[in-house]
Image (cartoon, helix red, strand yellow):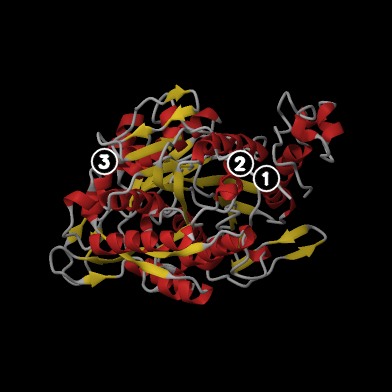
């Protein structure tokens, strides 16, 4: 992936190739000629590749730390309970790839073959891809700017040999930026079923989730529904419930009613999930996820 | 040799501290806000710069949503969140037409705004400028570190939660600090245990111990563990002053001690 200058105006911008920061960029002539604004050929390539993938679901939030990766992993495992269902889990969180750890696949490597990159299979019918598999040490930081991250996402969508897949689940980082725009852009010709949006009950999360919902409307991404995670804590000793993250503005329920979006379910805080992730164990089957 | 940088709008700012994580949802904005409040209670003048452009949380935490940003000769005037004008704040949240408006920008545009936030906000005289960041090691972080480098920041406060999936990302953030030459003031472990209000049993909701181990492995100071406290969450949701209102909370001693350690780091840098 070529280095782009720090002040890159973006290949689609009117200033592409003409701005002061374009001087010395290897793509300057290309951008100035207007070629940068042409549709990326990868979009068609990805459309072809995705013909063997029946359903594509993005797991989004806007807010960090609400459990997108945890949910994605649970959903993938839940769907793969049926041996005849082929499931693929793609982690496009380039800076903070949590999926390898959650799935117990740390240290696994990705292999190349004639037909592309092979995903790492945690079960016969559940394949996983993440930038985490491309890093040689757990301390390696991926300190990349937007354009380089976009390149990686393009490769993940175009060059991974998923095979015949019933469900492709795409786990995303928090925010509404490069990774999200790229995922939607590159999959634009391939039809995304929709997005599942994860939140926790408190307003500081809902605030960001409303922006994410706005983002979905802007890019015309259908919303399958919202999941409220860490809803309530059940004390393992006395079994009484406490709301650690109080829904001061009504939680996901009120937000979904206001915005007329389905609330798919509420998941309680379970300390065992954290411990199981640490051990890389297969998390227990969750009916919530399957019912949606 | 580089020419000396015009101090400009940061000329009156004595110490700059970045709050980073790598992992989302660990409490960067919470810790940034609580650190600012604690420093204010210690008599300091504090500014908060919120460079989380996609998820600007701080205006609500200080009950400043919807406030307008004005211009002066030196640039933007930060928003004062209190009558005494001891805490000022700049966030993209103030520049949005509606709180639900999404900032759907790619890297270069985010970089440009962050540079403006660093150079064009008229902070005036401040003892501390706390810079809250989004999760990750990408555009916003590089832009903030590059723009602040000429002003010799005190360093970074790195926030984690105890469980492995957070520690995994925070290790990468520590690598980011090393690679960009940003000193790590210390690691804070947030959401460290929850005491059930009914039976007082302490449960490690998000596992245990990761922060301290991480600090030790990376050879950086461990500044303390802050437990989960629904009163703290509620206080932030409602824009209250937690440090003033809840000195008996289990989270208070940890937050206060973290602020003390940051202040003790500061005089050492003056010489």
Chain name for mark 1: A
Lower sequence index among marks 2 and 1? 1
Residue of label 2? A178
Chain name for mark 2: A
Outermost residue, front side:
B271
Residue of label 3? B239
Q: Which mark is residue A150?
A: 1
Left or right: B11 in relation to A112: left
Q: Quadrant of residue A232?
A: bottom left
Q: Are marks 2 and 1 in contact (CB under 8 Å)?
A: yes
Q: Position of residue A194 (x, y in %)?
A: 52, 39
Looking at the rendered structure, the secondary structure element under dot 2 is helix
Chain name for mark 3: B
Pointer 1 local density, CA inside 10 Å: few below 14, some 14–19, many at least 20: many
Q: Position of residue B247 (x, y in %)?
A: 18, 57
**Image height of B99 relative to A199, above or below:** above
Please determine if labels 2 and 1 lie on a single subunit.
Answer: yes
């Amino acid at each position: 992936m070529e280095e782009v200058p720090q002040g890159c105006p973006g290949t689609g911008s009117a200033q592409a190739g003409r701005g002061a920061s374009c001087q010395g960029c290897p793509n300057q002539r290309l951008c100035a000629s207007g070629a940068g604004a042409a549709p990326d050929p990868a979009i068609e390539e990805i459309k072809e590749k995705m013909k063997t993938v029946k359903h594509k679901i993005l797991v989004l939030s806007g807010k960090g730390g609400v459990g997108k990766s945890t949910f994605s992993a649970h959903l993938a495992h839940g769907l793969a309970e049926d041996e005849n269902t082929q499931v693929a889990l793609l982690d496009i969180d380039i800076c903070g790839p949590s999926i390898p750890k959650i799935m117990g696949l740390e240290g696994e490597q990705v292999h190349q073959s004639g037909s592309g990159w092979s995903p790492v299979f945690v079960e016969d019918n559940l394949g996983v891809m993440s930038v985490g598999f491309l890093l040689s040490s757990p301390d390696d930081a991926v300190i990349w700017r937007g354009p380089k991250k976009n390149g990686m996402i393009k490769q993940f969508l175009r060059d991974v040999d998923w095979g015949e897949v019933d469900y492709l689940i795409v786990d995303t980082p928090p925010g509404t930026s490069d990774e999200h725009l790229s995922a939607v852009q590159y999959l634009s010709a391939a039809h995304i079923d929709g997005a599942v949006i994860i939140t926790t009950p408190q307003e500081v999360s809902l605030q960001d989730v409303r922006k994410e919902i706005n983002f979905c409307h802007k890019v015309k991404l259908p919303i399958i529904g919202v999941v409220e995670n860490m809803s309530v804590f059940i004390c393992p000793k006395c079994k009484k419930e406490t709301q650690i993250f109080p829904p001061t503005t009504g939680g996901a329920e009120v937000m979904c009613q206001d915005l007329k979006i389905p609330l798919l379910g509420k998941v309680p805080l379970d300390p065992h999930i954290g411990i199981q992730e640490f051990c890389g164990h297969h998390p227990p089957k969750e009916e919530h996820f399957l019912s949606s | 040799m580089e020419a000396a940088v015009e101090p400009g709008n940061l000329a009156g700012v004595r110490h700059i501290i970045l709050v980073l994580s790598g992992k989302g949802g660990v409490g960067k904005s919470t810790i940034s806000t609580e650190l600012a409040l604690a420093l204010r209670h210690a008599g300091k003048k504090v500014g908060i710069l919120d460079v989380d452009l996609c998820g600007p949380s701080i205006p609500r935490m200080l009950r400043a949503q919807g406030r307008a940003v004005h211009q002066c000769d030196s640039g933007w005037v930060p928003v004062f969140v209190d009558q005494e004008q001891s805490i000022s704040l700049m966030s993209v949240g103030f520049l949005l037409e509606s709180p639900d408006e999404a900032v759907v920008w790619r890297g270069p545009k985010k970089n440009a705004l962050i540079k403006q936030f660093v150079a064009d906000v008229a902070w005036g005289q401040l003892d501390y400028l706390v810079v809250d960041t989004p999760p990750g090691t990408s555009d916003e972080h590089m832009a903030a570190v590059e723009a602040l480098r000429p002003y010799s920041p005190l360093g970074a406060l790195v926030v984690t939660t105890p469980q492995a999936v957070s520690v995994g990302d925070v290790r990468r953030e520590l690598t980011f600090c090393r690679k960009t030459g940003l000193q790590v003031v210390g690691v804070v472990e947030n959401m460290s245990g929850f005491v059930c209000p009914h039976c007082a049993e302490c449960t490690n909701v998000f596992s245990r111990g990761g922060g301290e181990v991480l600090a030790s492995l990376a050879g950086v100071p461990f500044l303390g563990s802050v437990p989960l406290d629904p009163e703290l969450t509620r206080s932030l949701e409602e824009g209250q002053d937690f440090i003033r209102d809840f000195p008996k909370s289990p989270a208070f001693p940890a937050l206060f001690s973290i602020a003390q350690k940051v202040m003790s780091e500061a005089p050492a840098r003056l010489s």
